[in-house]
């Protein structure tokens, strides 16, 4: 691996080890069975500080979620405690500060058992194998790739309301000579300041926008404002890098007189507006995305039948419903009114359970159908079905050991135009820290 990669990663790890703590945070996951919080809660319950689930019982026969734990801690914080009990409540409040903040409970003036900067991250290996066939089944063009990714995600506390967050990625390919591999470098993928208030949130910098898990899986540079809890309004304004767009032309940013404007060459203006609703077992969002290239920014001959256009206007809707603890369904639909062809995209997925990185032995499986018209996709988040394709996907994930998750996907797809078939195999193993 290049010296620059080694030096950068070494520096990041030394700084992290010297002045920060590594902490995994997933506010909706189960608290691991061996977590110290269970003993603390049991002690507080025995002392009458915590009353379990409201029926004076503590359900110790199953893991509880971080959200449930925070609810009990919030009730304990409202009581007058002292001595050992107060120390336990403060320690629990520091551990579940993010979840308490989401509940509207401020955690202040605590002796936190953590530094002002926390690092999370992962290392992963991904393998894909694409097997293409012509309409007559005679052609068989196989593509395969093995990729290593190392990711660090620091979060620095500015004050009780503001944090600075970032993402650093280093990627290299299994089949390449790292000394000649230009991809083997550390890249700052995201960096933003985030202010969280009672019902108001602001983000400033480079971050993932709304719909990043459906049809807009990319980052943009700008400002996002949101207001509300169960019903939330969101607006974002900024710039989108040409490389983030699925179907952008190489001359994205050429000025009207034909000269390349260095300041605009790789970006275009970007705005979005969304309204989300999240209550109980249902959450959903309606959104609109507008991208304006700086002159003829989208692929000629595939965006419109007659001529190019420099705009995308995409209307999107996504929703998810959890029928039970184990069964849920989610999906999205997007439509680009500026495109004449491949202007619609959508996906419907049924999920059963799901692997939790904190809990060994957990697993999940899903079945999905996707139709991904490329002109209704800002950036692709999917692994088994790609833009320009439609087809079925089946997948499963499993946690063989704590903080290690394996994932397998298989896609039975074909091109929306032309009908060429492809079998896609996808495998990944992730190591979280």
Image (tube, rainbow, N blue to C red):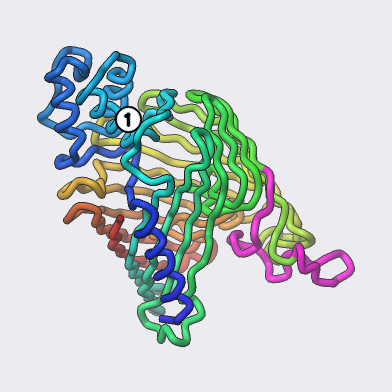
Pointer 1: residues within 10 angstroms few (<14), some, or many (20+)?
Answer: many
Q: Position of residue 370 (x, y in %)?
A: 43, 51
The quarter of the picture where the C terminus appears is: bottom left
Q: Is residue 372 above or below residue 284?
A: below
Q: Is residue 62 left or right of residue 87?
A: left
Q: Quadrant of residue 44?
A: top left
Q: Nearer the viewer, residue 171 or 76?
A: 76
Q: Is residue 62 left or right of residue 212?
A: left
On the rendered structure, is 396 left or right of 279?
left
The quadrant holding residue 48 is top left
Magenta segment includes 45: no
Q: Looking at the image, can residue 355 be seen?
A: no
Q: How many numbered marks have been drawn onto this rendered protein structure?
A: 1
> Residue at the spot x=43%, y=41% of the render?
331
Q: Name the residue: 74% across, 66% down.
A: 265
The part of the chain drawn in magenta is 237-264
Quadrant location of residue 323?
A: top left
x, y percent for residue 5: 45, 75
Q: Position of residue 83 (x, y in %)?
A: 22, 23
One can see residue 230 in this view:
yes
Residue holding disc 1: 93
Q: What's the magenta bit mostly, secondary-structure-wise?
A: loop
């Amino acid at each position: 691996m290049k010296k620059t990669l080694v030096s950068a990663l070494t520096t990041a790890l030394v700084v992290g080890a010297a002045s920060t703590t590594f902490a995994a945070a997933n506010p909706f996951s189960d608290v691991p069975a061996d977590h110290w919080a269970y003993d603390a809660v049991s002690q507080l319950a025995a002392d009458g500080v915590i009353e379990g689930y409201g029926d004076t019982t503590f359900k110790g026969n199953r893991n509880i979620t971080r959200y449930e734990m925070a609810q009990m801690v919030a009730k304990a914080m409202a009581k007058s405690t002292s001595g050992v009990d107060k120390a336990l409540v403060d320690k629990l409040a520091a551990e579940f500060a993010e979840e308490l903040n989401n509940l509207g409970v401020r955690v202040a003036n605590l002796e936190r058992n953590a530094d002002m900067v926390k690092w999370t991250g992962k290392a992963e290996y991904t393998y894909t194998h694409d097997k293409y066939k012509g309409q007559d089944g005679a052609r068989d063009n196989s593509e395969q790739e093995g990729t290593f990714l190392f990711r660090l995600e620091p979060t620095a506390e500015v004050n009780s309301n503001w944090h600075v967050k970032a993402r650093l990625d280093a990627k290299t390919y299994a089949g390449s000579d790292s000394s000649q591999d230009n991809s083997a470098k550390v890249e700052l993928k995201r960096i933003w300041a985030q202010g969280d208030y009672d019902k108001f949130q602001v983000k400033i910098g480079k971050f993932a926008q709304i719909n990043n898990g459906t049809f807009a899986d990319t980052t943009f540079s700008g400002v996002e404002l949101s207001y509300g809890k169960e019903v939330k309004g969101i607006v974002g304004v900024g710039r989108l890098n040409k490389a983030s767009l699925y179907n952008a032309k190489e001359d994205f940013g050429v000025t009207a007189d034909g000269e390349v404007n260095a300041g605009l060459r790789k970006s275009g203006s970007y705005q979005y507006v969304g309204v989300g609703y999240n209550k109980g077992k249902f959450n959903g969002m309606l959104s609109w995305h507008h991208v304006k290239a700086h002159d003829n920014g989208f692929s000629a001959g595939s965006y419109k039948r007659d001529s190019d256009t420099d705009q995308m206007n995409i209307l999107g809707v996504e929703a998810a419903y959890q029928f039970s603890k184990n069964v849920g369904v989610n999906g999205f639909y997007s439509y680009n009114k500026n495109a004449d062809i491949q202007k619609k995209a959508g996906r419907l997925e049924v999920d059963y359970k799901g692997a939790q990185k904190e809990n060994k032995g957990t697993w999940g499986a899903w079945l999905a159908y996707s139709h991904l018209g490329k002109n209704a996709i800002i950036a692709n988040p999917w692994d088994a079905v790609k833009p320009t394709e439609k087809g079925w996907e089946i997948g499963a994930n499993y946690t063989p050991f704590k903080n290690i998750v394996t994932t397998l996907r298989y896609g039975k797809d074909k091109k929306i135009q032309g009908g060429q078939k492809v079998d896609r195999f996808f495998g990944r193993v992730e190591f979280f820290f």
